[in-house]
Image (spheres, coloured by chain):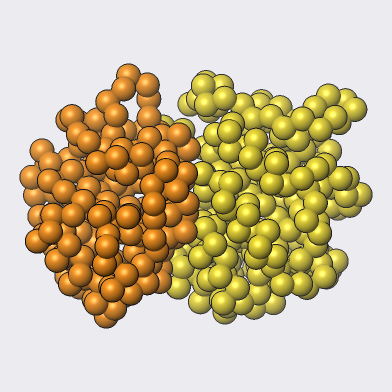
Amino acid sequence: MLKHRVIPTLLIQNGDLIKTSKFKNAEYIGDPVNAIKIFNEKEVDELIVLDVSKSKEKLEPDYDLIEEFAGECFMPLTYGGGIKTLEQAGRIFRLGVEKICINSLCFRDVSTIKSMVKKFGSQSIVASIDVKKTLFGRYKLYDSSSSCSYDAKFLENHLQQLLHVGVGEIMLGSIDKDGTLSGPDLNIIKKVSEKIRIPLISIGGVSSLEDIKNSVLAGASAVAAGAFFVFHGKRRAVLITYPSYQELEALLN
Amino acid sequence: MIVVIDYGINNSSSVARMIQKVGGSVKIATFPEDLDGASKIVLPGVGHFDEGIKLLNDSGFSDSIKNCVLRLKMPILGICLGMQLFCESSEEGTRKGLGLIPGKVLHLSDTSREDLKIPHMGWNTLEITRPNRLLNDCSDEQRFYFVHSYYVQLRSPELSIASTTYGAKFCSAFEVDNIFGVQFHPEKSHRFGINLMSNFVDL
């Protein structure tokens, strides 16, 4: 079996597929449904779709769009963006989504997350946390919905609180690496993976198969990537790719 | 008409979508009466054993399912928790299962090495243990998506049609006359799941 999953992650903004750099400068990539169709044909392990316009503007998830995505996915799909209540989560699961990803809710309403875990099972709840490295090499926790950042101590408590309510996976995003294709921050992957027993999904900076392997060696159970699977070459031409099962087997086993 | 049972804690829409994809006609049932006119049944499931069986019992689905499967001999496919609910009991809870097949549900920690994470989440392969109507016995490696913490232990292990190794070997699919169960998620397993679902539709 493949013990580690490799997960393309797509960002949506107002219905468009986009890609950011360090969480800024959204670049238009194309039609998300078309991209999902291609990933489906390439038999990806899983797919994560994050609607970044929903969390920032505090909007309701776009259920029609999510249903369209789920209809194209004959592999597990994780959706994130704008989920604040138990009812919204239930509605999204009924559309055919396997897991939901929550981020800003983790700062605001941990008891709702606890109810979600109880009702839908921990395997269906992914908590995402984004970290930023300071000039002095320390890590800060960043809340992109409010643009606030918190110190390392807060990050530690935040993580423990999420583990305590029983989320199934932690998705760790490295903001400085987002969209840069400059290699992952292996140090933070190592630090966080040592603190948790549930699967860690790392994201940010992957630019090669070697980076995926190194993330796994640093402790990631699954490696997600955005730019690596949608851009090709130095000029960042849009080309959707994904390694074959045989390539991944040779790389990760 | 293939009827997919929606008892509140499952992903019936994904399963229905895959049946449509392979050309089957499908209906999602939210009440036992919706089983009228069914030729086959699919019982998907995600979640807790006790909650699952309680929902089936309270809604009246349990009796209808037993009638269709045991008396009318209608083919039924249980997926993940659906497969586990066919058994007599589970370590996950205290309630009795549907009891369609002789077997019980055990926690994976009984078989796994300590360093393996539970739930068993991700892609894994099958070893086909005997000729059957659900899984093609091809030389190609078939892989499926698993998410579970419990597994089915059949009282007669020879009824198993495939096994999977996660720490230790467990039964990942069985066929007992008209009763089929799979621990993995065919609706989320690309062409491998499409083949399996197509075999079930064509039975």
Residue at the spot 45% in from the left edge and 34% down from the top edge: B191
Chain seen in yellow:
A
Q: Position of residue B58 (x, y in %)?
A: 27, 80
Q: List the single residue furthest toward the front.
A: B37
Whether residue B197 sits left or right of residue A59 in the image: it is: left
Q: Looking at the rendering, which quadrant does residue B6 occupy?
A: bottom left
Chain seen in orange:
B
Residue at the spot 28% in from the left edge and 34% down from the top edge: B135
Whether residue B66 sits left or right of residue A18 in the image: it is: left
Residue at the spot 31% in from the left edge and 22% down from the top edge: B138
Above or below for B162 versus B148 = above
Q: How many marks?
A: 0
Q: Position of residue A148 (x, y in %)?
A: 84, 68
Q: Position of residue A162 (x, y in %)?
A: 58, 67
Whether residue B144 sits left or right of residue B153 in the image: it is: right
Q: Looking at the rendering, which quadrant does residue A46 occupy?
A: top right
Q: Quadrant of the N terminus of chain A?
A: top left
B172 or B7, which is in the foreground? B7
Residue at the spot 57% in from the left edge and 25% down from the top edge: A244
Above or below for A99 versus A238 = below
Above or below for A243 versus B46 = above
Above or below for B64 versus A51 = below
Q: Position of residue A36 (x, y in %)?
A: 65, 43
Whether residue B175 sits left or right of residue A7 in the image: it is: left
A221 or A187, which is in the foreground? A221
B82 or B64, which is in the foreground? B64
A102 or B35, which is in the foreground? B35
Does residue B172 show up? Answer: no
Does residue B79 show up? Answer: yes
